[in-house]
Amino acid sequence: MKLIYEKSQAGRRASALPRYDELPAAPEIPEDLRRNEPPRLPEVPEFELVRHFTELSTRNFGVDTGFYPLGSCTMKYNPRINERLAALPGFARLHPLQDEDGAQGALELMWRLQEILAEVTGLDAVSLQPAAGSQGELTGLLLVRAYFAARGEAEQRRKVVIPDTAHGTNPASVTMAGYELTPVRTDARGNIDVDDLRGKVDEHTAALMLTNPSTLGLFDENIEEIERIFHAAGALMYYDGANLNAVCGISRPGDMGFDIVHINLHKTFSQPHGGGGPGGGPVAVRKTLEPFLPVPAVVRREDGGFGLDFDRPQTIGKVRGFTGPFGVFVRSYAYLRMWGPRLREMSETAVLNANYVLARLKDAYDLPFDRLCMHEFVLSARTMKREHGCTALDVAKRLMDYGFHPPTIYFPLIVPEALMVEPTETEAKETLDAFCDAMLAIAREAADEPELLKEAPHHRPVKRLDEVRAAKQPVVRYAFDDALERVEAPKGA
Amino acid sequence: MAAAESYPEELKYHEEHDWARVDGDEAVLGITWFAADLLGELVHFEPPAVGSDVTKDQSYGEVESVKAVSDVIAPLSGEVLAVNEQVVDAPETVNEDPYGNGWLIRIRLGDPGETDDLLDAAAYRQVLANQ
């Protein structure tokens, strides 16, 4: 398919503006800031423009076009009712500086969403401000710091414990918040190695960051013991809500002993993501940490109305403009109200679907931790690589030929040739079966015709990418004057 | 072309998949074939500064492939005398020749006694077999 620039013909226009004889004087722009030449924009008529981008949109793959079992990302279907509600003029056209009396509906929605998230997490207070999971993590760690600073323990407690299965954002957030990382190992059952942990938690420990269920899709069987170790040392517990989709209405982080939780509205509560709209990473905390939450807090006033409370002397401050990504709140609130008290069924179905797919695939691929899984599971192509030379990457590329989005690969890092599959609750059994059939067919192909995998994808608009060359010689700029430059990147560029 | 699997007898190994070629009070350091194979073709090496100190069991640099970015763990402590610029310019050299042209840094040993803690080739192979 041609680029829009390659379709450009000088003088073609999508519209013609009338010429005015008496234009108002242009504002004075300093000479050195003026363009010498007009910008090089593609020149196409409107129908070409429409056809071009419509064609492009058909080359995209998303949850609206197919099954998307991208492990750890919870690519569930995003109900259309969410969009209808978020587009209501009272929500969509509300100005962020609207006074409280004129924004009662929006404030009430945020307050009610906070209440629901507190109930789901088993904690006391919520801030909706953080814009994504990663920002939720940083906010959570800043809360940890503020908490210990208020207790005079900020200098003493410098370490944050993270298991080796964690998402990369966890250690990154720890570093960004000014803490030191204490890694802890995973045991043979896929839990945190409690013996390793015991020797690493002391009066210098500020917090644990844990994803439970972990990125292996396994619920930590020793969570109560872990809770005792941290709280006995006076440290806090942070719950990375990346995998909250597995436990809603079944178990609550607050009941497991966690003090701070971030929730990914774009994963668990159906805000579109993966190249779509903004995320949402609210943080829920125990009562003792509430004074430190970001301002403004959305509160219910004594008169029954709703308002913004800036009077929080111990707050860590603002972490995002205004009150956070409001459209995300509308979608997640709508989604949560649709499930209502049946929210548990969402998680139960997600876990059931994952276990069904796992049961069908476990004989064809390696299963490093053979347990009932939660909402996702991790297979390995280790034996396939050794016996047939086909890797997790080859399996992923071949899956695209079968019309599926590949699972997450090469993560978590502790599993070689990892394939991490998360089907989510929204898929029908027929879809799950079609995916399993494809995975099983690929396992047979690896033995019979390994080249089919190694050269895949064969039936996609883009063939196998040279990732190494893309990383070493990235060409990120369209070459206007030398079309060849686009194809033949200069050596060492 | 990636090298074939090997773990030369004359080298000392660290269980985090690093090797050291000790020569008097100096040592040349690199990553093992296993580490290079696991990462796949390297696309970047972030070396330490010449003159800086590296500490045994701690990270002294990063190697990056399209799969992952990984810390490089120092098998021994010491001062960095040289960085392999060939690897900086062409990181895939590590995949092609992990124990030769693909060396990463040369150090002056801070504590020659540390070499006693390292593994010989047979013991390192045992580490790999247990993985």
Image (cartoon, coloured by chain):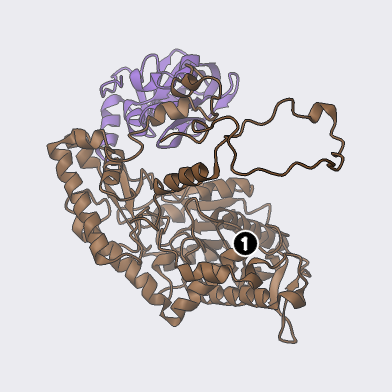
Chain colours: A brown, B purple
Q: Can residue A69 be seen in this view?
A: yes
Q: Is A190 drawn above or below residue B57 in the view shown? A: below
Q: Is A13 drawn above or below residue B98 in the view shown? A: below
Local crowd size for mark 1, using a 10 Å CA cut-off: few (<14), some (14–19), many (≥20): many
Q: Which residue is drawn at 60% across and 23% down?
A: B52
Q: Can residue A372 be seen in this view?
A: no
User: At label 1, which amino acid type do we have?
Assistant: Pro
Q: In this view, does A468 lie to the left or right of A278?
A: left
Tag 1 secondary structure: loop
Residue corresponding to mark 1 = A325
Using the image as rendered, state which of residue B60 and residue B25 is in the foreground: B60
Q: Which residue is drawn at 62% across and 50% down?
A: A158
Using the image as rendered, state which of residue A300 and residue A163 is in the foreground: A300
Quadrant in which residue A461 is drawn: top left
Q: In which quarter of the image is the N terminus of chain A?
A: top left
Q: Is A415 drawn above or below residue A6 in the view shown? A: below
Quadrant in which residue A323 is drawn: bottom right
In the displayed image of the protein, which residue is found farthest to the bottom?
A303
Residue A12, image x, y percentages: 58, 35
Using the image as rendered, state which of residue A165 and residue A407 is in the foreground: A407
In the displayed image of the protein, which residue is found farthest to the left?
A448
Residue B93, image x, y percentages: 39, 18
Badge 1 sits on which subunit? A
